[in-house]
Amino acid sequence: MENYFSLLSILCKSSAHIITNDSSKLRKCNHENSLKPQKSPAFLYHIHTLSLLLILATSFISNLCKLCLSFFFNFLEVGQHIWERCDTPRALLRRGCPFDRLEDPRGSTVLLKNRKITFHPKEQRRQRQHKQVTQLQPQSVLLHLRPGEPQSFEVKFRRVEDYPIDLYYLMDLSFSMEDDLSNVKKLGADLMEEMRNTTSDFRMGFGAFVDKTVMPYISTAKDMLRNPCKRTEPWPCAPPFTYHHVLSLTANGSLFTEQVGRQRISGNLDSPEGGLDALMQAATCEEQIGWRNVTRLLVFSTDAGFHFAGDGKLGGIVLPNDGKCHLHKNVYTRGNSQDYPSVAHVAEILRQKNIQIIFAVTEEVTHLYEGLTSIFPKCAVGMLSNNSHNILQIIVEAYNALTSEVAMENSKLPPGYHISYTSHCKDRKPRHSEQGRKCSNISVGDEVSFNVSITAPLCMTASQRPPSVIIKPQGYSEEVEVLLSPICECSCQKDVVPRSPSCSHGNGTLECGTCRCKEGRVGTLCECNQAESGKAIDSYLCRRDNATEVCSGHGECVCGKCVCHKSSKKPNHAYYGQFCECTDFSCDQYRGLQCGGHGRCVCGVCICLPEFRGRACECPLSLGSCLSQDEQICAGRGDCHCGTCMCHDNRFQGPTCELCPSCPGVCTLHRECILCRAFSLGLNPKECEMRCIHLNFTLVGQAGVLATVPPSPSLHSCVEVDTEGCRVHFLLRTRQKEDSVHVHVALERECPSGPNVILITAVLSASVVVLGVALLLLWKLLTSIHDRREFARFQRELERRRWNRRENPIYKSAITTTVNPKYKEQ
């Protein structure tokens, strides 16, 4: 129990940090100025007689409670924990916390560097104003993040005109690219001329690659190393190499043509080339290549696939690629000692270096490089002709496609942090999720914006807090640095008062309205000496009416006062009161709601709203729910009790006693009286006069006249059938107060006409005749069908007959042959 309240004050501070992750933006109530110094009750613990103890204890408790309620506990209820000052703003204000005491730190956004986007860079160059061209705004942002509360800021991007471009041409010089080399030699001047339409600041360079110079990628025979093509005309092939940087980025198109013109084709054995080795060196060797912080384009031209990580084992190379520059005299020196880089490794380096790739490849391998578009950060694939004559068109079209789309990306966020994007492209329609990161079809001069929102998790230690996050468009060197500053402390913690007089004459530190006691002191105001405190006396002061349980079993006795707990089953249910006897969650319920939802629970008793009463505030004082359609209470058939009608007659039901399923209708109820009074039907005259004296009649000629009667809520339109089967039309107007019925009756009845005997006889006779003829025709049809089938069967049997006279047992020939036994042939 040492420094119990000190721990509570720390817990309150921690709770204020933790609960800010709630969407309700929990706040903390600061009563720093409400604490007053009080006398220590330590002298109570030296009293030895029980009688004197009771007298003094009673006096002490009475005075202490009065002071606490007047000062410190004017917000917290008796027995409540200090950390219960943390709640939603609405709840704190409802509980009596002054508005100016609400401690509610909020997040904010500060623009540290906000250089405006450049609009006319070409004019600046003409005027020799060498200002930095800016396409992204802002450049640096500071976010003060309250955990759980997102902070947003806007990032603008404008594709400015005349933006500088660096282009590096990386070509496969294996033997199969021989016919392409001649067209690439002419590329320099043509490309310079074409790119002047886009920018006046264009530079280009050149590099070449083949493959690693070990078996089985090339032949290591001496003559093959000198001339891998085995030819001398028109010129021998160049010795094989991994990667050769030929020309650094330059604005001299003639120099590009001259240097490329000196290149000779080389050769290797297998089909895949060492293109990834060359890509890695071209990206990492920024100083040798001459890359600037402008638009970086790399054209990769080949007609074959590529080796990747693991293929080096075929040549006995097992050392992984380190992703560093290894150029010596413009030649890659680690080609035979380091493995090929992986595709993901190259993609990450290209992302870091802001290099956009244009794959100019032949039709046979187009599908292979199209698969890289989902891995590489920003790239395009163009189909190269057999002799590369369309290379200029591929570069221009790919450049336009790459620069017409902007996709935002950010550096890795620490666990728990969340970032989201909402894009506003040319059509100004907001897009969210992954689509919120991109804008397409952007032309020169178009401006788009992205709303970036970052949310911080629970507070972390200083070592775990991320210093910043980088946000940038893919393929561009410009970026937005977002400095993150989580808000993990309340502003009141800056005004700490050590040895404050408010904490029992300096026995504690006043921080955010609570006392953090020094060692050996306990109590809300550090008013008790732990060494002098006795458990027996504490226990007695915390028992209600000499009860056996301390603090009603819902708290602990500290310094002679109860410190109440929360419910173990329901943590949001807390106890309070001098002896922890009160809770605001034990009141009667109505329809599953505490206090019926029409009041609040205070110490187990419902305090109802003015419009309700009852133990559970279940009874509304208003009679509105008992009014029937005619504005009568329970339709005049019952009494209103707690907003519900209690019907006098059990036959009537419903919320206002208006429903009677077993009662006859108002029309049927007066049918006999109307028939006997208006038409002398049904009842005899004497009985009719006795039963129907309450009816006031108005007779009209035709039923159409009834429509002219003014309508009213008590008017009923009726149609009944009399004893002769005729329909009678009448109107009933009931009057509850006068207990009389006024009837408008139409004397013209609608009687059904008698049957037409002639017509019925004719129809029946015709029906019999037609039915007989139909039966005869049906019989004739069936017999005809039967006869036809029998005749057809006879015909088939006749055609199938086969009579053999020799086999006929009853056949006898008409010729008889007799042989003379004595006749001998001469």
Image: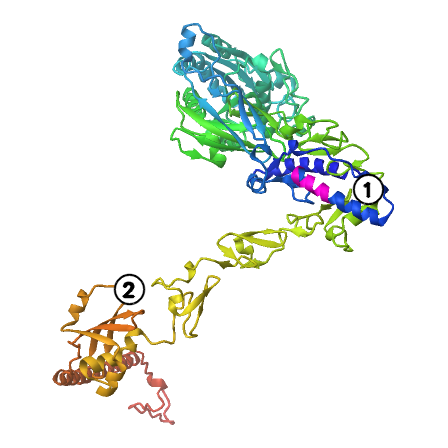
Lateral position of residue 513 relative to residue 102, left or right: right
Q: Residue at x 79, y 44 (%)?
A: 56
How packed is label 1: few (under 14 Cα within 10 Å), some, or many (20 or more)?
some
Residue type pointed to by label 1: Leu
Q: Earlier in the sequence, mark 1 or mark 2?
A: 1
Q: Is residue 270 above or below residue 766?
A: above
Q: Main secondary structure of the magenta part?
A: helix
Q: Name the one closer to the observer, 3 or 816.
A: 3
Callout 1: SS: helix
Q: Was residue 124 drawn as part of the magenta stretch in this picture?
A: no
Q: Which residues are magenta?
A: 62-71
Q: Name the one closer to the observer, 808 or 183.
A: 183
> Does any portion of residue 240 appear in the rendered image?
no
Residue at image mark 2: 713
Q: Residue at x 59, y 12 (%)?
A: 287
Q: Name the one closer to the observer, 514 or 129.
A: 514
Q: Is residue 757 above or below residue 68?
A: below
Residue type pointed to by label 2: Pro
Q: Position of residue 485 (x, y in %)?
A: 61, 26
The quadrant in which the C terminus is found is bottom left
Lateral position of residue 542 relative to residue 793, left or right: right
The quadrant in which the N terminus is found is top right
Which mark, residue 44?
1
Closer to the observer: label 1 or label 2?
1
Q: Position of residue 296 (x, y in %)?
A: 50, 19
Q: Is residue 721 above or below residue 42?
A: below
How packed is label 2: few (under 14 Cα within 10 Å), some, or many (20 or more)?
few
